[in-house]
Image (spheres, rainbow, N blue to C red):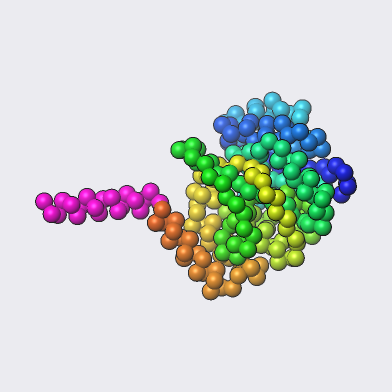
Amino acid sequence: MSKESPKLSVVIPVLNNIYFLERAITSVLHQDYQQIELIIIDGGSTDGSLEIIKKYSSQIYYWESGKDSSISDAFNRGLRKSTGDLIAILNSDDYWKKNTVDFVVSACIQHRNYGVYYGSIEFIDSSTMSKYIKNPIIKNMACRMSLFHPAIFVKKEVYEKVGPYSLEYDYAMDCEWLHRSMNSGISYYKINRVLACMSLGGKSDKFYMRSLWEYRKSSIENNIAPKIKSYYCFIKYAFLKYMTSYKFIRILKQKTINKARSFN
């Protein structure tokens, strides 16, 4: 890796996301750092996303459009086209903060013995426009996802050692890769900055229980947590999700109404 100016490859996978894709693209192109190659893997969009990609084609290092088998497949296609010293994956509905890459490159140069660099995430609920910051705690990875790939930057040599994303995972493929890298002895460096904004309501949110189950499977297979702890975590966070869901609140409200009626 270059000592002074490592090249960064950014992979944006997309499928029918016309409303947010341009924001993701421009958040990369508007970084002050110059050594960036942008790679877009489109899964065969039909909603106008391709027109947005073509609009910026002169600033995109590589893009393709065609059906892929899964999100993991799209990730891996992007990895194969990456030539940078560092590689980042940015979902099409997420975006980077200003100067994100400057902070990452600075950390990479100053702390060269690490393989993965990560920072905080600002979550955005597009339905309410509410925001909150998630501070990553790596030791919590044994029980739940606490690192998020829009704010993760990986050395190319680490991908070469750990391997690509598993096609066996449909929802928690990024979690499984992180678990695998940890089990391989890869060192992580924390950047004390909010590096990216992440939209709630993605595939892992919509299929939360399936994602949580895959997380449990990965933590066991990669020796991150023993079976008893992984099952405990699954039950705990599944219960918390149910307790905070709209469905639960609606049921509780209806029971309260029915109880009040019974006294009349």
| Above or below, 155 relative to 66 | below
| Above or below, 161 relative to 7 | below
What is the magenta range?
245-264
Is residue 68 visible in the rendered image? The answer is no
User: Dividing the picture into quarters, in which one does residue 141 lie?
Assistant: bottom right
Is residue 93 visible in the rendered image? The answer is yes
What x and y, as percent, mark residue 153? 73, 49
The answer to which of 247 and 80 lies nearer the viewer is 247
What x and y, as percent, mark residue 109? 83, 48
Q: How many marks?
A: 0
User: Dividing the picture into quarters, in which one does residue 163 lie?
Assistant: bottom right
Which residue corresponds to the image point at 78% horizontal and 45% vertical from the top-left?
Answer: 105
User: Which residue, as the protein is rendered here, is positioned at the far left?
Assistant: 264
The answer to which of 104 and 1 lies nearer the viewer is 104
Report if residue 257 lies within the magenta region. yes
User: Which residue, as the protein is rendered here, is positioned at the far right?
Assistant: 3
The secondary structure that most of the magenta stretch takes on is helix
Residue 232 is left or right of residue 159, and the answer is: left
Which residue corresponds to the image point at 62% horizontal and 58% vertical from the top-left?
Answer: 137
| Above or below, 22 relative to 198 | above
Which residue corresponds to the image point at 71% horizontal and 66% vertical from the top-left?
Answer: 183
What x and y, as percent, mark residue 115? 77, 56
User: Dividing the picture into quarters, in which one does residue 211 lie?
Assistant: bottom right
Report if residue 232 lies within the magenta region. no
Which residue corresponds to the image point at 51% horizontal and 49% vertical from the top-left?
Answer: 205
What x and y, as percent, mark residue 216? 56, 65
